Amino acid sequence: AQSVTQPDIHITVSEGASLELRCNYSYGATPYLFWYVQSPGQGLQLLLKYFSGDTLVQGIKGFEAEFKRSQSSFNLRKPSVHWSDAAEYFCAVAPNNAGNMLTFGGGTRLMVKP
Amino acid sequence: EAQVTQNPRYLITVTGKKLTVTCSQNMNHEYMSWYRQDPGLGLRQIYYSMNVEVTDKGDVPEGYKVSRKEKRNFPLILESPSPNQTSLYFCASSLKQKTGANVLTFGAGSRLTVL
């Protein structure tokens, strides 16, 4: 069975600083990988996904993530954080034949200092 | 607008009083699923449905029931709610593509409190 670990429960960064949120997964083969964002009081919005091909994936809102097979990681990055990025971020993994069968990590709550 | 609609968005109830959280999607998706979100645990799958009249247990099905009589609707039923079912619930849906490259669309969530 697959599993996902997000080691950082809370992260605080200053507005304009760079951001990296960590995600490690466990799965026997190359999985499908996702990052979702949940703004306060909102549902989950898909930021980006990796199915195959280029291991550097571009998403919405200026986010990107890099799939590193050797490290079983799929870290989320943004070069310059905006106050509106304050939210909870979830990494998720799915089998590579069923992208809707998601297993989520515990989430990382991002706070942005002015 | 393509969307997944959940109702109610907020509910406070008492132990043992049966309740239903409705979920409806207008995208003709075959696949639908329910998750619960708890602090530090992320989202955990309760039940899912691959198509009409086909449902399966997820990781945390105890205390819940579902039905899929129509393609667009996938209600979550709590026959006898208990305080440990206090949580934020999400419904999601997707197409069922042969490649498996499916992406879930989530509803806005339903916050349930059981006293």
Image: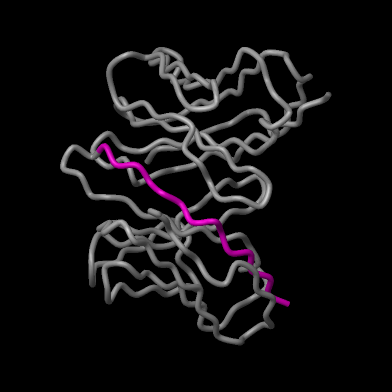
Q: How many marks?
A: 0
Residue A39 percent coordinates (x, y): 64, 43
Residue at 59% across, 78% down: B81
Q: In the drawing, does residue A69 fall left or right of residue A78?
A: left
The C terminus of chain A - image quarter: top right
Check the image and name the residue furthest to the right. Answer: A114
Q: Is residue B74 above or below residue A93?
A: below
Residue at 61% across, 12% down: A79
Residue B19 percent coordinates (x, y): 54, 81
Identify the image quadrant of residue B14: bottom right
Task: Name the foreground residue: A46 vs B26.
Answer: B26
Residue at 67% across, 49% down: B39
Magenta-tinted stretch: B101-115
Residue A3 percent coordinates (x, y): 46, 37
Check the image and name the residue furthest to the front. Answer: B1
The reply to whether the magenta stretch includes residue A37 is: no
The N terminus of chain A - image quarter: top left
Q: In the drawing, does residue A51 fall left or right of residue A6?
A: left
Identify the image quadrant of residue A21: top right
Residue at 42% across, 75% down: B65
* Picture colour scheme: one colour
Identify the image quadrant of residue A49: top left
